[in-house]
Amino acid sequence: MNKLTTSEIQKLRAQAHQLKPVVMISEKGLVDSVLKEIDKSLKAHELIKIRIFIGDRVERESMAEEICKKTDAIRVQLIGKILIIYRHNPEAAVKPDTAKLNTVSAKKPSGKRPPAKQARKAVN
């Protein structure tokens, strides 16, 4: 997989900030079904978060390397139990470097009415 520049990694980190983990790895570890789900999620989204519940820091570090190697993805960040990975998909509808992930939701109405416009008085 190609290496990313520091600025590209920073942009991906910023975009991943609002994402929720789509795959969670627990006591069974990195089994084939988990790898298939990671691959499927990468095809759909390019940038995903994975929560790793098992092991200590060293085990999570080695698991992150194994995930990236087996899925041909780039590790963007590993903080605590959260792993962020990226794999470019030219057929994906949304490009992570140009589009905003998780679109901004519409504002809720506050329940207050806007102030009524006052009629102008004609000056004679």
Image: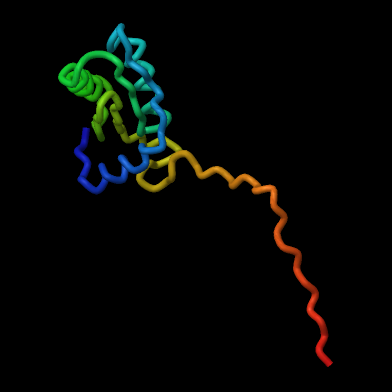
Residue 38 higher or lower than 74, as above or below:
above
Residue 79 on image: x %, y %: 25, 30
Q: Is residue 107 left or right of residue 24?
A: right
Quarter assignment of residue 41 = top left
Q: Nearer the viewer, residue 119 or 101?
A: 119
109 vs 94, left or right, is right
Residue sitting nearer the eye, 112 or 68 = 112
Please name whichever residue, 9 or 113, is drawn nearer the observer in this view of the structure.
113
Query: Where does residue 52 sit, x and y in percent of width and height?
Result: 30, 19
Question: In the image as oriented, which residue stretches furthest toward the left?
Answer: 58
Residue 15: percent from the left, percent from the top? 37, 41
- Is the residue 113 above or below the residue 79 in the image? below
Say whether residue 61 is left or right of residue 99. left
Residue that lies at the very extreme toward the top in this rendered image? 28
Which residue is depicted at the point 34% across and 43% down?
Answer: 14
Residue at the (59%, 47%) spot, across then down: 107
Q: Quadrant of residue 64?
A: top left
Tally the marks: 0
Say which quadrant the N terminus sits in.
top left
Where is residue 62? Give x, y as percent. 17, 19
Q: Residue at x 22, y 41 (%)?
A: 4
Q: How is the image coloured?
A: rainbow
User: Horizontal placement of 40 versus 5: left or right?
Assistant: right
Residue at 36% x, 18% y: name it: 24
* Figure quadrant of residue 121: bottom right
Which quarter of the image is occupied by the C terminus? bottom right
